[in-house]
């Protein structure tokens, strides 16, 4: 999904959804697994999995320990649980408005010690929630999808996106705590890698963008248009000139600020978890990298300036040799007016910037729309343009793929080019009403398009990655080897630098020659293999995943 998370005065939104486990798994037999091709250890795991696959509770317990590789589609603020926000709102001495359902900073505090916020008539201090269970429950419900029931004029889509503005007053000094929370949760579920979307400071870039006239008259289409043919001001020559003007105006000097924001966030997380010390928390084992979020629901001047800053920031990270920010993504609700009307022009921006910064990885929210949410014309081109113009290496959500023009040809193209789809089952159900037989996961798998499960916004949705694995089994009858393939796919399509462990893309049978002469995931790889792993971060994480599977499968009865 998409959300809005602006550093300007724009309401912080990112995309996410929710939904609880599907119904009990029907008696339909699970999809046959290629047990004959499985190793003896895999066959033990298959038997253990099959013994619990019909019982949601036993299945969840089994899958909690399953190695899951990575989560490649996670929005940071959306991943934090409401209870954490309440605690941090108290630390920030914030107030809560029952009328707007939002936290806000008080204009004054008392002279007492410690000082207390002066919230105004009808408002509440955040710390009152610790003594008032009704207020505490209200805050949890306001900041998440808990207890939400659609009513006249208020859909799951509305509630979901509204939550972000409600906790947006929180101080970003808590970002290290947020990273600690998601890393700790991941470690508890045998997950090892997260690519986390976060919006770095871009206020100065946006201001600069608005100060420079758009290359040609911005022709915002009439309401309801999809902008499928609107390319005004977005030719390569026009964008090149605009880029030169932005860089001359000082945009490149803003890169250091954003790089420091990401670096400080990771340093804060390391301090909280005592990483690199004898007291290191288990969460330190989870590798974190960032995806640079771009807010797509704004005029072209702002979007291009922020996108250019993102590309410049990632390029500088890549040049450092140790990138903490590994890719770029566009966020905010895809069905929003500007997201729809500006879509084509934004893909042309990415087409141009990719030509200038070819090393910068791109993953895009595309096809996070459904019939009824937008006009039929709006369903016909988003994924294709993300792939062919936006140079997306991964697609987030991709729910409307079968409504695209020449859908089968698009699926074939995605499969042949190994463009992965990030699958967010609970999110798609809650926000779009797309679940089970209406979800394209089986279509993608049948077409050979690589897929991996992800959480999107586990805090707002009140889920975790194990929930999504369980839901995939219950709703789509996936088997053990299917889940193992998805976990491998997540790391295969990560934006970590270096070569893959696997000899061919998405073929998890032949290993790179440097490591082919030994057991996958062995404790002590040969010197040749060890040198290869040390030189290729992605392959090293993949080796660690195989090691985790060895341990998991060996302990199965």
Image (cartoon, rainbow, N blue to C red):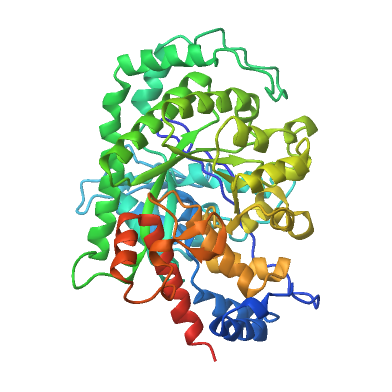
Would you say 264 lies left or right of 504 here? left
Counting from the top left corner in percent of width and height, residue 205 is at: 37, 24
Residue pictured at 34% horizontal, 41% vertical: 106
Q: Is residue 463 visible?
A: no
Counting from the top left corner in percent of width and height, residue 500 is at: 44, 56
Q: Nearer the viewer, residue 538 or 265?
A: 538
Residue pictured at 50% horizontal, 9% vertical: 215
Would you say 465 lies left or right of 526 here? right
Counting from the top left corner in percent of width and height, residue 538 is at: 40, 56
Q: Nearer the viewer, residue 475 or 144?
A: 475
Residue pictured at 63% horizontal, 58% vertical: 426
- Could you tell me how many numbered marks the image carries? 0
State which quadrant residue 311 falls in. Answer: top left
> Is 327 located above or below residue 488 in the figure?
above
Counting from the top left corner in percent of width and height, residue 552 is at: 48, 80
Would you say 186 lies left or right of 460 here? left
Q: Residue furthest bottom?
A: 557
Residue pictured at 59% horizontal, 46% vertical: 419
The quarter of the rendered structure image containing the N terminus is: top right
The quarter of the rendered structure image containing the C terminus is: bottom right
Q: Is residue 351 visible?
A: yes
């Amino acid at each position: 999904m998409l959300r809005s998370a602006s550093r300007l005065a724009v309401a912080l939104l990112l995309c996410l959804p929710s939904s609880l486990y599907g119904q009990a798994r029907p008696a339909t037999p699970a999809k046959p697994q290629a047990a004959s091709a499985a190793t003896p250890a895999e066959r033990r795991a298959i038997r253990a999995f099959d013994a619990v696959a019909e019982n949601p509770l036993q299945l969840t317990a089994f899958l909690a320990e399953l190695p899951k590789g990575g989560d490649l589609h996670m929005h940071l603020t959306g991943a934090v649980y409401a209870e954490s926000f309440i605690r941090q709102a108290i630390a920030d001495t914030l107030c809560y408005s029952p009328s707007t359902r939002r936290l806000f900073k008080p204009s004054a505090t008392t002279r007492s010690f410690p000082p207390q916020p002066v919230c105004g008539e009808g408002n509440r201090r955040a710390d009152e929630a610790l003594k008032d269970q009704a207020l505490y429950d209200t805050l949890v419900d306001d900041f998440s999808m808990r207890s939400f029931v659609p009513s006249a004029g208020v859909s799951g889509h509305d509630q979901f996106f509204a939550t972000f503005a409600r906790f947006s007053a929180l101080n970003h000094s808590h970002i290290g705590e947020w990273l600690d929370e998601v890393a700790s949760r991941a470690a508890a579920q045998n997950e090892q890698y997260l690519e986390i979307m976060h919006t770095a400071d871009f206020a100065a870039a946006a201001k600069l963008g608005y100060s420079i006239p758009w290359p040609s008259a911005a022709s915002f289409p009439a309401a309801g248009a999809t902008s499928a043919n609107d390319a005004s001001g977005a030719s390569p020559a026009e964008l090149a000139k605009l880029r030169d003007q932005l860089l001359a105006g000082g945009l490149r000097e803003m890169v250091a600020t954003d790089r420091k924001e990401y670096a400080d966030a990771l340093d804060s997380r390391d301090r909280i978890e005592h990483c690199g010390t004898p007291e290191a928390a288990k969460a330190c084992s989870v590798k974190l990298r960032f995806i640079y979020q771009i807010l797509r629901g704004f005029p072209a001047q702002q979007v291009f300036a922020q996108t250019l800053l993102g590309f410049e920031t990632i390029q500088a990270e890549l040049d450092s040799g140790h990138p903490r920010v590994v890719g770029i993504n566009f966020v905010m609700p895809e069905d929003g007016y500007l997201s729809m009307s500006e879509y084509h022009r934004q893909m042309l921006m990415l087409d141009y910037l990719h030509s200038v910064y070819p090393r910068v990885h791109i993953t895009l929210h595309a096809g996070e729309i459904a019939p009824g949410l937008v006009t039929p014309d709006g369903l016909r081109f988003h994924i294709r343009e993300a792939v062919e113009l936006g140079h997306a290496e991964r697609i987030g959500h991709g729910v409307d793929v079968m409504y695209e023009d020449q859908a089968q040809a698009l699926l074939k193209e995605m499969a042949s080019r190994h463009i992965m789809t990030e699958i967010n089952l609970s999110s798609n159900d809650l926000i779009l009403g797309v679940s089970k037989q209406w979800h394209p996961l089986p279509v993608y798998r049948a077409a050979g398009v690589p897929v991996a499960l992800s959480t999107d916004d586990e805090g707002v949705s009140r889920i975790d990655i194990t929930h999504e694995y369980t839901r995939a089994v219950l709703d789509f009858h996936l088997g053990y080897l299917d889940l193992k393939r998805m976990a491998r796919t997540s790391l295969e399509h990560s934006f970590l630098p270096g070569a893959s462990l696997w000899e061919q893309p998405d073929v998890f049978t032949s290993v790179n020659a440097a490591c082919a002469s030994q057991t996958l995931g062995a404790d002590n790889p040969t010197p040749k293999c060890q040198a290869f792993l040390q030189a290729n971060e992605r392959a090293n994480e993949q080796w660690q995943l195989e090691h985790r599977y060895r341990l998991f499968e060996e302990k199965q009865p």
